[in-house]
Image (cartoon, rainbow, N blue to C red):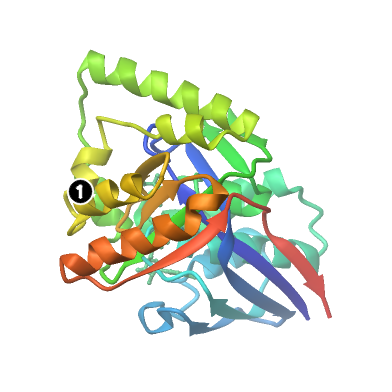
Amino acid sequence: MLTVRAPATSANLGSGFDVFGVALGRPADVVRVERAPETAITVTGAGSQYIPEDPAKNTVGAVADALDAPARIRIDKGVRPSSGLGSSASSAAAAAVALNELYDRGLSRRELVPIAAEGEALVSGEAHADNVAPSLLGGFTVVTDDGVTQIDASIPVVACLPDMAVSTRDAREVVPERAHMSDVVDTVGSAATLTIGMARNDPELVGRGMEDEIVTPERSALIDGYDRVREAAFEAGATGVTVSGAGPGVLATCYRSDRRAVAAAMVEAFDAVGVDSRAYQTVVGDGARLYTE
Ligand SMILES: Nc1ncnc2c1ncn2[C@@H]1O[C@H](COP(=O)(O)OP(=O)(O)OP(=O)(O)O)[C@@H](O)[C@H]1O
Ligand SMILES: N[C@@H](CCO)C(=O)O
């Protein structure tokens, strides 16, 4: 049996809609695979009651198909679905690494990105790779039509997940079709600042570079208490705050010494508007890891 742990991820980072992503130290999905004549899936863990075990509806089923690698697949969910931390992508990335090894397909992590993205096409209608790329490769990733660029990075973050669900499919409906040139110019400036921040491991630059006036204002309106949580995080020392992925999770960057206070402030602010939440104090970290038993 082969076991793979694949991390949660946060896509977009404000200014990099459908382009930027980071791997998070935690939470993570753990996927175990064994050869079988036909694919069969079982799901346990966080939010498993909302996740189909039918291979035709689960992201790992799409990956098994794409690799022509039928298997008995057990998914232990650490990443809650529809929370903004790329839950469906974590399972897909883990399955891609595990099945590639199980069937000796010999594909590199980069070659596995489009295969894992097949799972995303199944659940959100588009094979966007901004969650599967960091889950496979780790660090900070930039996904474009030309491929994936990756650098290792180590930025402390808080991912605060309110107890509500926003599906990626719904959150894509509110993305504006057009933008003002002045907002585009500001967002390009932010994205460039963030990229330099990642290269320098500088939480100040990364935080400033998450500002975006195009997609985030529309998406944040779907999250009860967002403005209050954002303000509370900044008051507690956050260097930047944005919607994590398609939401409703909220991502804050900070210095390590402020991380605990930022997490507490975010949970308290959600609580003040009657929303329970859970904050992960974590860091931009490694990609999927394979264990053999
Ligand atoms: N292995 C899987 N893990 C999680 N969700 C899955 C899986 N397979 C299928 N799904 C379905 O995918 C949907 C969740 O995907 P969605 O893109 O909305 O959230 P997400 O993967 O957590 O990403 P985001 O970061 O955008 O919130 C749910 O409807 C869920 O049932
Ligand atoms: N870039 C995608 C990621 C979803 O997790 C979106 O924001 O719709």
Q: Which quarter of the image is occupied by the C terminus?
A: bottom right
Label 1 CB-ligand 2 distance < 8 A: no
| Residue nearer the viewer, 292 or 252 | 252
Quick one: 86 or 97, which is closer to the camera? 86
Q: Name which residue lies at 67% across and 54% down.
A: 287
Residue 229 x, y percent position in the rendering: 26, 54
Name the residue at 16% across, 49% down.
221
At 58% from the left and 47% from the top, the residue drawn is 133
Residue 127 visible in the shown view: no
Q: Quadrant of the N terminus?
A: bottom right
Instruction: Name the amino acid type tagged 1.
Output: Asp
Crowding at dot 1, Cα within 10 Å, few <14 / some 14-19 / many 20+, comes out as some
Q: Nearer the viewer, residue 120 or 231?
A: 231
Residue 160 seen anywhere in this rendered image of the structure = yes
Question: Can you say whether 94 is above or below 187 in the image?
Answer: below
Q: Secondary structure at mark 1?
A: helix
x%, y% of residue 65? 59, 64
Q: Position of residue 64 (x, y in %)?
A: 61, 67
Q: Is residue 88 above or below residue 257?
A: below
Where does label 1 land, which residue? 227
Q: Is residue 159 left or right of residue 267?
A: right
Q: Residue at x 66, y 74 (%)?
A: 70
Q: Give the percent coordinates (x, y) of residue 234.
A: 33, 44
**Residue sitting nearer the eye, 27 or 129:** 27
Quarter residue 110 falls in: top right
In the displayed structure, 14 sits above or below 85; it is: above
Q: Is residue 187 left or right of residue 175?
A: right
* Figure quarter occupied by ligand 1: bottom left
